Amino acid sequence: MRLLARNGTLLDTTTMEMVGERSVVIEDDRIVDVIDGDGGSAGRNIDADVTIDASGRYLLPGFIDAHVHHVIPTMNFARLQRMTDTELVLAMAKLAEATVSRGFTSVRDAAGAVGELVNAIERGLCPGPRITRAGRALSQTGGHGDLRPSNEVPIPSCGCQIDTNNLGHVTDGADACRKAARYELRDGSDFIKIMASGGVASPTDPFDSVQFTAEEIRAITTETDHRHTYTTAHAYLPDAIGHAIENGVRCIEHGNGVDQAVAERMAELGVIMVPTLVTYKAMQDEGAKFGMPTVNLDKNRGVFEMGQASIEIAKRAGVELGFGTDLLGEVQPWQNQEFAIRADLEPAADVLRSLYVTNAKLCRAEGLAGVLKPGAYADLLVSDVNPLERLSALAHPDAHIATIVHRGVVVRDLG
């Protein structure tokens, strides 16, 4: 099928400039041509099965979110533990479909058993974004990914024992870490995620804890190096971030408490940081309503403000930033609010570079996602907003995104 989006002003994400008029020609799941127009003539003589008039509007690549979780469809963690496999799969599919409806046509799933969801989307069994996945994250006992009740009696086992849940593997010792990493890479994970510090949404680990030993982290990063991919780490404070990057981690998720010295070291090593500011605001405002435990709400206090400060620290040091959201369950509709939050902290062009350039790199989709050029994915948005001038308006997709094209098909058209 051939689709033509005619006469729009196009965001060139290589220069972060608006160019136009342009018409984008799509065949099946690829862009095959971008035509320079003159006086509204672009694409006029092209036959197409579907034509979208983008005159007076802006053509943008589909958004990319570098930190999502499909396996956490509710903030009520007790309810999540009781979900049947069928309930969980249906909830995951619903989240995936809604993600595309907000303009996010590509995402990086940063922890969870989503292989079957990926397969279902690719086979056309349910709608959803293109997913680059970490698979199950790796956590130490008592770490951010250890979801077992604190009073659970341990079963005697050898040191290489791995305890697995939908979110991750609980693994201790270099040999077990190596085995878990190899398992996930064998199972199709595109990169590996480790829990290198405490967190907000976990039950037993202190927020300021440093997790895994240097030997354990090195065992994991050696495996991703050998697979020509990378390890990313959930980490907040300087000790945990520094520990991770000095042992081969090449991306930091969150990084809310980074300090100047560690940020400068990140820049020196070429480590990317993916801020996820909206999730802390959403948990703060909505968590109690949706059943988030009090212990987690208490851990969340001040983390949003800490994250806002981290943007300036990281940018001053020269750290490359991605764009993520990390929203859980019922607050995933807040996804586009990250635009408004980041717009208050950075120039629009820098945020768009994080969204389209750095995120494409993290998704290992450079030249495919985040660009409108021949050979790229057929993921395109038509907006009435120039994001270089009004980035925060993208926080309201129903008002400002008229058309969403995903995989060469119009999935939403508001006219």
Image (cartoon, rainbow, N blue to C red):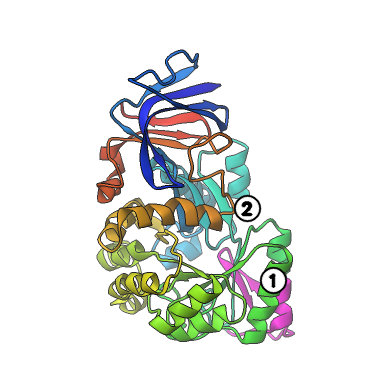
Q: Is residue 92 visible?
A: yes
| Number of marks in picture | 2
Q: Which residues are magenta?
A: 153-180
Assess whether residue 44 is covered by the magenta stretch: no
Element type at marker 2?
helix
Percent position of residue 313, x then y: 35, 75
Q: Residue at x 48, y 53 (%)?
A: 357
Q: Label for residue 115?
A: 2
- Disc 1: which residue: 180
Instruction: Name the outermost residue toward the front.
Output: 38
Q: Is residue 199 above or below residue 20?
A: below
Q: Nearer the viewer, residue 165 or 86?
A: 165
- Is residue 168 or residue 377 the one in the foreground? 377
Q: Nearer the viewer, residue 378 or 282?
A: 378
Say if 48 sits above or below 30 in the image: above
Amino acid identity at mark 2: Gly
- Disc number placed over residue 7 in the picture, else none: none
